[in-house]
């Protein structure tokens, strides 16, 4: 159980590092890294009996759903070609993921 929590925290660090890179570079290729990390977080957290992972369920669901929305927006943009609206939506969803990950980090005592 402890290893599962450690792996989740490592994934959370990886997600935040990837978000930071994405904000710095605007490289949407990093979304594939985010997808892998978020899928791993989901595998570790969803339905877990570990109290610490249960306690962050709402924040994790926010991360999962916002990432799914990013995928949907990118699929729509392939057809609609509206880069301003796409960028606005992507920034909103990335911001929501960042906010949820910060809440989890605070709950785990990783940051103040």
Image (cartoon, grey):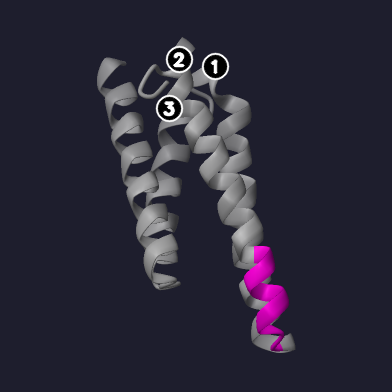
Nearest to N terminus: mark 2 or mark 3: 2
| Residue 15 part of the magenta-drawn span | no
Residue drawn 49% across and 36% down? 101
To which residue does mark 3 refer? 105
Q: Which residues are magenta?
A: 81-89
| Dot 3: element | helix
To which residue does mark 2 refer? 52
Q: Residues within 10 Å of mark 3 (few under 14, many from 20)?
A: some
Nearest to N terminus: mark 1 or mark 3: 1
* Numbered label attached to residue 94: none
In this view, 109 is above or below 63: above
Q: Residues within 10 Å of mark 2 (few under 14, many from 20)?
A: some
Quadrant location of the C terminus in the rendered image: top left
Residue 58: image location, x then y, percent? 63, 28
Residue 59: image location, x then y, percent? 59, 31
**Residue found at the far top of this picture:** 51
C-alpha distance separating marks 2 and 3: 11 Å
In this view, 56 is above or below 85: above
Residue drawn 48% across and 33% down? 102
* Residue in front for this viewpoint, 86 or 3: 86
Residue drawn 61% across and 64% down? 90
Quadrant location of the N terminus in the rendered image: top left
Residue 96: image location, x then y, percent? 61, 46
- Please report contact status of discs 2 and 1: CB closer than 8 Å, yes or no: yes
Q: Residues within 10 Å of mark 1 (few under 14, many from 20)?
A: few
To which residue does mark 1 refer? 55
In this view, 4 is above or below 32: above
In this view, 97 is above or below 35: above
Residue 6: image location, x then y, percent? 28, 25
Question: Which mark is nearer the camera, 2 or 3?
Answer: 3
């Amino acid at each position: 159980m402890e290893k599962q929590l450690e792996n989740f925290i490592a994934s959370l660090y990886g997600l935040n590092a990837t978000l930071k890179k994405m904000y710095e570079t605007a490289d949407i290729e990093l979304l594939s890294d985010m997808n892998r990390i978020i899928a791993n977080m989901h595998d570790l957290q969803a339905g877990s009996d570990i109290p610490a992972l249960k306690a962050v369920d709402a924040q994790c669901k926010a991360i999962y759903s916002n990432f799914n929305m990013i995928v949907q927006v990118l699929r729509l943009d392939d057809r609609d070609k509206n880069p301003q609206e796409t960028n606005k939506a992507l920034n909103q969803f990335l911001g929501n993921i960042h906010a949820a990950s910060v809440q989890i980090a605070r709950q785990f005592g990783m940051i103040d």
